[in-house]
């Protein structure tokens, strides 16, 4: 750590930590031992204790063994946030198998690719018609041995479960007819038949726990092998950074999807604390506000779009939500995208808590940087490195460290960095050096105070006329134009000067603008070589489930008429 960063490094946070060599399911077992009656999950008002969660996970581990799953096999979990998700996650690990998470919104083709690449033996999915249909088709195509199915209502409180059965289950397509001849089984039936004691399986903490798929920089998704040690190290770092967390005294609001590694690490952090985990299957604003007021969470990991939506609802009061009390929220760490200053300030004012920006990537389990929770933090910065996380900013051309303040490619090294890409040594060598440095693929800089800033993605940098243009800079300038709602900038192949800069623009409602008008605005604020040569108007921009713009899909989407 440089001298400047040391000034603002939180005094309460050790720079170096001791990391326990335990498994993720060992973390659950320890919390169940210390706090067996503490609430582990809250799901639509139903609760499960840590002792109960541990026993259910044990039952699932025994069920897997009965289905022929052996240590080292892969189990795919295709579920929304729910108690079933946690039971299957920790139960799979207790059986010595590896977990791969599947997005419930995936199409069959995407499911088949991940199942085949991971070599999954079986999958757990939901009975809801669309999700089950795609899962069943994928299981058949990938030649899985079993498809285990659960109904979302299985862990509802009794009264809600009865109402759901009468009024929503059939109407919303949550009933599925299983075919035992195709290896389809109900999760609740499997668990009912199993003992609650711990399975006698020894798992090394250095072994791979999760195959976490990432798009990486190019090509098809790759699976980062995250070991138990990687994931336990990252939750240990996070727990040290948020130094005032209380054991068995927190409530973590989990609306980020658990198939995403940031949400998974936040959940593991909660389990290590024996904290309550309030599980919300998806971000529906009314449901989220209702759950916050009812269950009073203290920690809310999220993304900027979530905090912005809550701010808008509470400030505008379009639907009477202004009366919602969110003052229980003490700490929020935002990831996935840049956190706008006004979003941070409004949310902190409304909640009375702290909202800071952090940074991570799948290959680092994922968190590497966070702004200090209670000390100095800077809007637009990803913050300071976590304990034991080394960072270098290197020259694009020669790999040498740049001077402070200069832009370069960011490398990180620490105990949270992945083991490798699954069965892909060639891609592993491209990003992970023999001495443990991970190439993040992000362009970054470090200021005079030791705070880091993401400038852009390396793969998004536009080279035009031999000069580098960072799309994020152009996007931030165009975003200031009063008629623009959203904008994305990318390079497209050009004839003479390498790449041509193209802006994809979504206008605000009831606004009209011309390409010339937008280029003229850019000319007032950018060097001539950074001005977009092409402007295309869109009704919307393609985005991921975490609201990131999918630039690779911009050319596939239809332009606005």
Image (cartoon, rainbow, N blue to C red):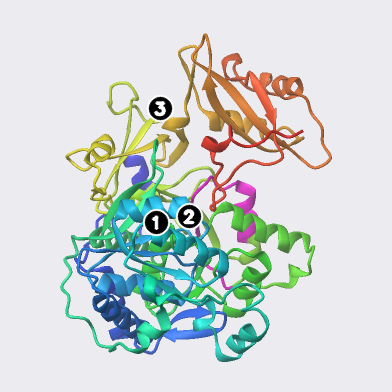
Q: Quadrant of residue 166?
A: bottom right
Residue 466 falls left or right of residue 508:
left
| Range drawn in magenta | 328-348
- The residues tagged by marks 3 and 1 sit, at their Cα atoms, a distance apart of 50 Å
Percent across and percent down for residue 495 are 53, 11
* Residue at numbered disc 1: 141
The mark nearer the N terminus, 1 or 2, is 2
Dot label at residue 108 = 2
> Helix or strand or loop: what does disc 2 sit on?
helix
Quadrant where the C terminus lies?
top right
Residue 345 within the segment the image draws in magenta: yes
Percent across and percent down for residue 229 are 23, 60
Dot label at residue 425 = none
- The residues tagged by marks 1 and 2 sit, at their Cα atoms, a distance apart of 9 Å
Q: Residue furthest top?
A: 496
Residue 65 falls left or right of residue 461:
left
Q: Quadrant of residue 94?
A: bottom left
Q: Residue furthest front?
A: 181
Asked if residue 68 can be seen in this view, the reply is: yes
Residue 119 within the segment the image draws in magenta: no
- The answer to whether the residues at label 1 and label 2 have Cβ atoms under 8 Å apart is yes
The mark nearer the N terminus, 3 or 1, is 1
Percent across and percent down for residue 383 are 43, 47
Q: Nearer the viewer, mark 3 or mark 1?
A: 1
Q: Nearer the viewer, mark 2 or mark 3?
A: 2
Dot label at residue 406 = 3
Mark 3, other Cα within 10 Å: few <14 / some 14–19 / many ≥20? some
Q: Is residue 325 above or below residue 193?
A: above
């Amino acid at each position: 750590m440089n001298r400047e960063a040391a000034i603002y490094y939180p005094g309460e946070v050790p720079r170096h930590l001791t990391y326990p060599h335990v498994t993720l399911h060992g973390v659950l077992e320890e919390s169940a031992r210390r706090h067996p009656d503490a609430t582990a999950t809250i799901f639509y008002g139903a609760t499960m204790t840590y002792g109960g969660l541990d026993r259910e996970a044990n039952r699932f581990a025994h069920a897997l063994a009965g289905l022929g799953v052996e240590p080292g096999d892969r189990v795919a979990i295709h579920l929304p946030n729910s108690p079933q998700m946690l039971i299957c996650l920790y139960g799979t690990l207790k059986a010595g198998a590896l977990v791969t998470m599947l997005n419930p919104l995936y199409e069959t083709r995407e499911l088949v690719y991940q199942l085949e690449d991971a070599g999954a033996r079986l999958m757990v999915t939901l009975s809801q018609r669309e999700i089950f249909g795609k899962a069943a088709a994928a299981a058949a195509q990938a030649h899985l041995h079993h498809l285990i199915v659960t109904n979302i209502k299985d862990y509802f409180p009794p009264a809600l479960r009865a109402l759901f059965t009468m009024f929503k289950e059939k109407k919303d397509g949550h009933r599925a007819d299983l075919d035992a001849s195709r290896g389809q089984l109900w999760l609740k039936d499997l668990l009912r038949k199993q003992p609650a004691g711990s399975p006698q399986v020894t798992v090394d903490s250095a072994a791979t726990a999760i195959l976490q798929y990432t798009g990486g920089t190019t090509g098809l998704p790759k699976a980062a092998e995250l070991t138990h040690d990687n994931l336990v190290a990252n939750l240990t770092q996070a727990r040290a950074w948020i130094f005032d967390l209380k054991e068995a005294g927190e409530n973590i609001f989990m609306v980020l999807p658990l198939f995403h590694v940031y949400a998974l690490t936040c959940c593991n952090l909660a389990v290590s604390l024996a904290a309550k985990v309030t599980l919300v299957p998806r971000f529906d604003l009314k449901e989220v506000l209702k759950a916050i007021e009812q269950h009073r969470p203290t920690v809310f990991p999220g993304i900027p779009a979530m905090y912005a939506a809550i701010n808008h609802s509470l400030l505008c009061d379009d639907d009477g939500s202004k009366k919602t009390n969110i003052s229980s929220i003490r700490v929020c760490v935002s990831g996935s995208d840049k956190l706008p200053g006004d979003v941070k300030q409004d949310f902190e004012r409304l909640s009375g808590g702290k909202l800071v920006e952090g940074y991570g990537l799948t290959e680092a389990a994922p968190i590497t940087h966070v702004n200090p929770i209670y000390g100095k933090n800077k809007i637009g910065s990803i913050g300071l490195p976590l304990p034991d996380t080394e960072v270098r900013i290197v020259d694009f051309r020669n790999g040498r460290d740049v001077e402070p303040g200069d832009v370069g490619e960011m490398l990180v090294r620490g105990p949270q960095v992945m083991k490798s890409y699954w069965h892909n040594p060639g891609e592993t060598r491209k990003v992970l050096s023999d001495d443990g440095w991970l190439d993040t693929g992000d362009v970054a800089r470090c200021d005079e105070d030791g705070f880091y800033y993401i400038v852009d993605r390396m793969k998004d940098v536009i080279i035009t006329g031999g000069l580098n243009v960072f799309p994020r800079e152009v996007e931030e300038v165009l975003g200031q134009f009063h008629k623009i709602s959203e904008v994305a900038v990318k390079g497209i192949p050009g004839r003479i000067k390498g790449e041509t800069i193209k802006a994809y623009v979504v206008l605000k409602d009831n606004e009209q603008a011309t390409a010339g008008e937008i280029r003229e605005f850019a000319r007032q604020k950018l060097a001539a070589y950074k001005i977009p040569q092409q402007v295309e108007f869109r009704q919307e921009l393609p985005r991921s489930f975490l609201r990131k713009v999918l630039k690779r899909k911009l050319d596939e989407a239809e332009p606005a008429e």
